[in-house]
Image (tube, coloured by chain):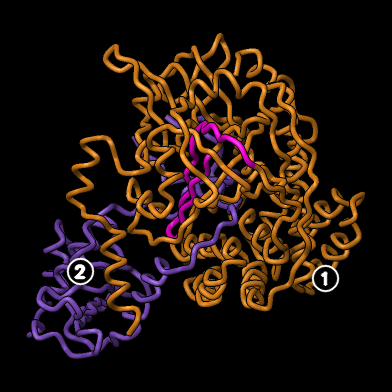
Chain colours: A purple, B orange
Amino acid sequence: MNADRPAWEQLSALRVVSPIQPRKLAKVPFVEMAEGRLQGVVSSGSDIERVYVSSITAGTHGYNCSTNNNRPCGGLRGAPCKHLHSLVDEAVLQYGLDQVARYLRVEGERAGDLVRNLDGGHESIPAAVVFSRFLRHLAYLELPPASEPIAEMHWFPSLGAVS
Amino acid sequence: MLATQLAALREGPQPGLDEALGLVAGFDDALANGFARLGEERAEALTALAGAVAATPLGPLAADAAGKLAAGSIAEEHLTALAGARTTLLGAVHDALLARLDTALGRTRAPWNGSQPPTADPLTSACRSWLAELAITGWRGVDHELASSADQAIQGMLAEPRLRRAGVLLDGLAAELRASSPVGAMEHLPVRRWADLWARALLLIRTGAVEGAEEVSGRLLPLGVDIHEHGTAAQIQLHAILEPHGRLVRTSVSAAKVDTIAGPFVWQLFQDHPVLTGALAKHLSLEITGMTLLPSGDLIWQEAKAGVGAYSDPFATARVQLGGASAPAVPPLDRHPVRVAEPVFVEGYKSDGAVIRLDGAELPFDLDRLPQSGPLTPQLLKASTACIGLMRWDGGGWRLQPLAVQASVKKEPVAAHNGDWAQGPTDQKVLKSGAKAGDPVSVLKERAGRLLRK
């Protein structure tokens, strides 16, 4: 259909980052594939002040889950806890199964399979690094307003509706 | 816009255009490969680029920079000089395209009478070094570490309103490089785009705010709204006619965001601008008093100086007043083909959803600029017969970015505008799926409120 489109190389305005799919943020406000890990933050179901920091290392599949104050998650008893399950579920919603599976280097037809097929064990991954990345993510919403028009945004068309 | 105007736009080649873009492509190729490994051929491409601006005040600087880079001595000032030469060439391309469009449309344009003094902010030094490092390494050598190494410096710039514009640009570039790392493994590189962003960042960091503003009062008649977005920023830009002068102006509001806030939820970021979003959602005119208008035609939006007026149909404004409206000048630094976004009105065409056909003339829709935050869809474009849009030029051709269309759906006339959902979606299906997803902006603001200040 787009045979007559100019080459990617010659375009100024185009989409380089694949769009992420919208999802409910209440349970897992933050998921990312960065620093060699699938990592994120899961809100506690019982305490509104508490969040769990969950992460899975790509390739080796070592995983960890603890509170933001570094208390180990009680649900980690020789197998991934419910927070890690939620993390993978939401990552699959946000990025798609293929991308998550490829990043972690694990196989599976569904999000649940990915967690089941992890072949690593509990590993000490510091929560502080992930949590501070989450805080930096949130800090965007607190930036003071600026009123100057940003002409450079013409390079960034609103992520288009693909029919 | 008439078929004859469209034909005039395409009539004959644009002299010098291919040559200018060829020189730019030579520079972009060198940048993709890295200035640390120029080689003879790529060094010649830089010399040719510098040669093209020899007759301008930039000439000696650019020639010296090309020579120094070829000899393997790379300093930030040399990179800036060559970024300036590339920007000058694309500026000339922009001017030629816009002049041809203005002639075809019979549109008069104000001369530039503003200024943009140079500046040097110490907060930007880390980002300047990063841009230099990227140029030395080349896109093909960029890995996660280099792509992320300016993150903290960019955060620092974003937190300073005076550096926001450059910060937003750098954050967008850094996110693309991170997502593409290691870049060496990519089959195709967006070389034009990344060189654009790199060169603009380098120059923008050294340029102060536009001076030469005036205060204006009157009535704004909206034409349509353009929506810009990357992972961590969104901007809405309203194109309107300022009465009583019949001047085309634009007013923009931007907000920082995160990638999980997208689609219709982007409007949530602008709810502290109820006058502006209300006018968009309800198709009202705006009464403004003593608002600042930059010589670039950008009205600095201030809710306190605006009030909503009477109902105003953008299609009536486009039919009756757009043809005779005068256009603002484009600031020299902004002159780049990507910035060409001229409001036009086209009607009486037929479309397959991808291209409009008007008395034998054809013009493709810019489907890459059709946002998910509004009701416009390719299906609706196919059924459309009238369109308010922006003329865009990219990849060697003109395209029409729709801002609003009139269409016939099940034999009923309908009108849809990009800003229709400015105060929430009006489409039942979208409303329902939005209610299911919850509101990401309030969820994240709650989390920020609880966790950030500890």
Residue situated in front as seen by the camera: A123 or B185: A123
Measuring 21% from the left and 80% from the top, which residue is drawn there?
A: A63
Chain containing mark 2: A
Q: Give the mark toward the camera: 1 or 2.
A: 2
Magenta stretch in the rendered image: B217-238
Which element carries disc 2, helix, strand or loop? Answer: helix
Residue found 61% across the figure and 34% down from its top = B242
Foreground of the two, B109 or B90: B109
The amino acid type, in three-letter code, at marker 1 is: Ala
Q: Kindly report the distance in space between the C-alpha atoms of the residues bearing marks 1 and 2.
A: 52 Å
Callout 1 touching callout 2 (CB < 8 Å): no
Where is the N terminus of chain A found, in terms of image quarters?
A: top left
x, y percent for residue B370: 43, 37
Percent across and percent down for residue B419 are 41, 38
| Prevalent SS, magenta region | strand
Q: Is residue A110 above or below residue B238?
A: below
Task: Return the chain for callout 1.
Answer: B
Which residue is tagged 2? A87
Image position, residue B153 (x, y; %)? 55, 76
Q: Please tell me whether mark 1 sits on a helix, a strand or a loop.
A: loop
Please say if A131 is above or below B406. Answer: below
Residue B222, magenta (yes or no): yes
Work out which residue is located at the far top of the displayed protein and give it: B359
Above or below — where is B378 with respect to A42? above
Q: Quadrant of residue A137?
A: bottom left
The crowd level at tag 1 (other Cα within 10 Å; few <14, some 14-19, many 20+) is few
- Assign the C terminus of chain A to one quadrant of the image: top left
Residue closest to the eye, A150 or B138: A150
The residue pinned by badge 1 equals: B71
Give yes or no for residue B95 being in the magenta stretch: no
